[in-house]
Image: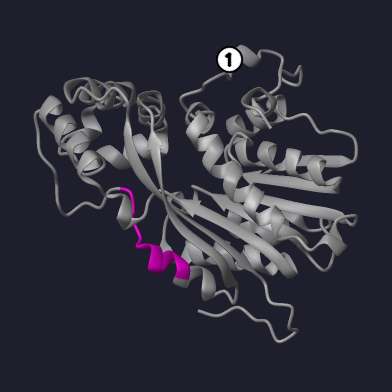
Amino acid sequence: MNQQEIQPHPSTQVQNPETLSHSPFTYEYFANQPEIIKNDKELIGRAFSLTPEKEANKKRYHLDIATGTGHVLRLIIPEYQERGYRGKIIGIDPNAMSLAIARRDTIAPDGIDVEYIEGYGQDLQRLVAGKIPEEGVDSVSIHNALHEIPGEDTKRKVLKGAVSVLRPGGLFTFNSAFVTESQTLDYGKWKAAVLRLVGTGRDKKIETIKYHSSQEYEEMITNTGLQIVHRDIKSVNLSRESLEAISIYPEFREGFFRDIIGQEEIPPEKKSEFAIKALDVLKVEKGFPRKYHEIIAQKPLTPAFSTRG
């Protein structure tokens, strides 16, 4: 599938779509970067390749948690089409603006029903009640989002909810760049350059974006009872444009600045300017690599399955 085929499609579902395009209040700009699309597409393709041939013709259900502007969901649609699947794909996110963009940019082909639902991952069972089969969905995804969910208990609740709506034998896909393996020298230099531009220091008592080790994430997932069938830590080179795109994404920007003394007095737009200007100071032209931890896990077929922890 070429790049053109997986770009967002125009739609008339939003009266003034230009007011939403590349909104700084959503993940859209970063999610549309080629390397991000490629990384997620590879993980999704690997997961779908594990589907037994005997299940190819059944009606399938997929659930994407923290779907944002629908980036992952739109990568799943071609996988359905390629394999001749019919069924339903549901995306859930609490951000109404993100979902407006998702609905605008997603075209559901014949035989595939797409629905976006506003809500939080921890309320998953309530949100999808009556919308999925009693035995559960065939697959669930949560890509580059679990680290944004505040609180360890809430993260675990979201994972347990995902497993509770997954049918026995169903697959779960996860990835995140916010693993300790991603705390590279390049990232540290970027933060140091921002501090110099702001003219202040760090409050070391304040935690920025929460990083977990890959082992910690794997334990969170296996503690739900899922069995990991694929794991990898991939190096993805984020282009200069991608670094600028993530600099205007509120969740990243505010986390990046959270421990900077006096940050509460800096307007959001100015924070983005500082982050981008720091890339100029460092003469970053081709971007720099970022580690992505990815997992595919399966819900056991045994009826003795239960969640733990």
Nearest the viewer among 196 and 284 is: 284
Q: Image height check: is 81 above or below 136?
A: above
Magenta includes 212?
Answer: yes
- Residue 309: x, y in percent? 50, 79
- Residue 130: x, y in percent? 84, 57
Lateral position of residue 251 relative to residue 280, left or right: right
Lateral position of residue 228 relative to residue 133, left or right: left
Nearest the viewer among 205 and 243 is: 243
Q: Is residue 64 visible?
A: yes
Q: Quadrant of residue 240?
A: top left
Where is mark 1, residue-wise?
19
Residue at image position (22%, 29%) is 265
- Which class describes the residues within 10 Å of circle 1: few (<14), some (14-19), or many (20+)? few
Residue kind at label 1, given as amino acid type = Thr
Q: Quadrant of the N terminus?
A: top right
Lateral position of residue 172 relative to residue 77, left or right: left
Lateral position of residue 31 relative to residue 12, left or right: left
- Residue 137: x, y in percent? 77, 60
Nearest the viewer among 269 and 191 is: 191
- Residue 97: x, y in percent? 59, 30
Q: Image height check: is 263 above or below 162?
A: above
**Residue furthest to the bottom:** 304
Q: Which residues are magenta?
A: 209-218
Residue at image position (56%, 43%) is 40
Residue at image position (24%, 27%) is 266
Q: Secondary structure at mark 1?
A: helix
Q: Image height check: is 52 above or below 192?
A: below
Q: Is residue 131 visible?
A: no
Magenta includes 172?
Answer: no
Q: Quadrant of residue 277?
A: top left
